[in-house]
Amino acid sequence: MLKYFDEGAKGRPCALLLGGFDGFHRGHGSLLSAAKKTGLPVGLTALSGGKGGELFPLPEREEIFRALGFSFADEHILDGKFRETSAEDFLSDLFSRIPAKAVFCGEDFRFGKDAAGTPALLKERAPCPVTVLPLAALGGEKIAVTRIKQLLSEGEIGKVNALLCTPYFVRGIAEHGRAVGRTYGFPTANLRLPAGKFPLKEGVYAARARLERGEEYPAIVNFGPCPTFGVEARKTEAHLVGFQGDLYGEEVTLFPVRLLRPVRKFQSKEALEKQLEADRTAALGLVGAKEEK
């Protein structure tokens, strides 16, 4: 489905990036830079529904695409029908709907049933010039979504952000929780994250929190269970340093900065309070004071 971010680009000749684009990393950035040199509106394909979870579900990706200056996204769900589409039929449908005058992809781009389509086939069938770029690398390793997911599973937020063109974030709606944190002087927002979001390594993180109203706060975020209170299910609970008020029903965006420590069970209220104070001090040191937009 075509989704336009710039209505003025509808029906106009364009430059088109081909790929899945779950998380727009530095390698993808090379494709975008090349496409922008054409002077044409730039669009891209975006695939959703793969196994193992996504770095960014499509609504989050759309925000990233807008911020990077894309005019549109051609969004596809990896369902049975899409998976059975031949490489030739995929290209025929694509170019019947999008008036591409220049196409860009990475050398590892594959498409169509059983991933049979290759850049060579794309060059043969495309109605315009096709530019194929080599995979980008950083620190001697190729930049890929699989690598970014591995780093997230290790809690390496700094390395993740070094690979992405925009900072990694998680977003959810604040819901009513157990309200236990208030009794410790650390009230938390319990966030419901989108289904299918690839999980961060469990632990306590320093983060920057952004509210719908535009305010930003340093935050301590627990991704995972709360064993001190007998909660085994994975939760996302954020304490916004300096915030006073009610967040229930509000969308909160969290930008993790660093993994501070693993999740652990505390044997006393005093031990937990002492650790939370240390976490808050660490978060303030890493993120800084509250900002208002």
Image (tube, rainbow, N blue to C red):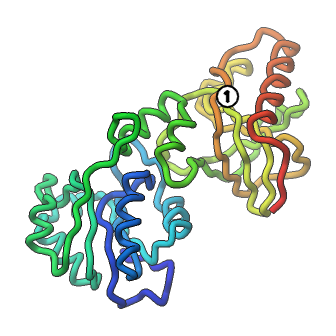
The residue labelled by disc 1 is 204
Q: Is residue 23 left or right of residue 233?
A: left
Structural crowding at the residue carrying mark 1, measured as other residues with C-alpha within 10 Å and reported as few (<14), some (14–19) or many (≥20): many
Q: In which quadrant of the rendered view does residue 233 lie? A: top right
Q: Between residue 121 and residue 234, name the one nearer to us.
A: 121
Q: Quadrant of the C terminus?
A: bottom right
Q: Between residue 5 and residue 108, name the one nearer to us.
A: 108
Q: Secondary structure at mark 1?
A: strand
Residue displayed at 34% across by 34% down:
140
Is residue 203 placed above or below 177 in the rendered structure? above
Q: Is residue 141 left or right of residue 112?
A: right
Q: Between residue 119 and residue 214, name the one nearer to us.
A: 119
Q: In which quadrant of the rendered view does residue 75 lie? A: bottom left
**Residue 287 image offset from top left, x and y in percent:** 75, 40
Q: Amino acid at mark 1?
A: Val
Q: Is residue 222 left or right of residue 270?
A: left
Q: In which quadrant of the rendered view does residue 150 lie? A: top left
Q: Is residue 196 visible?
A: no
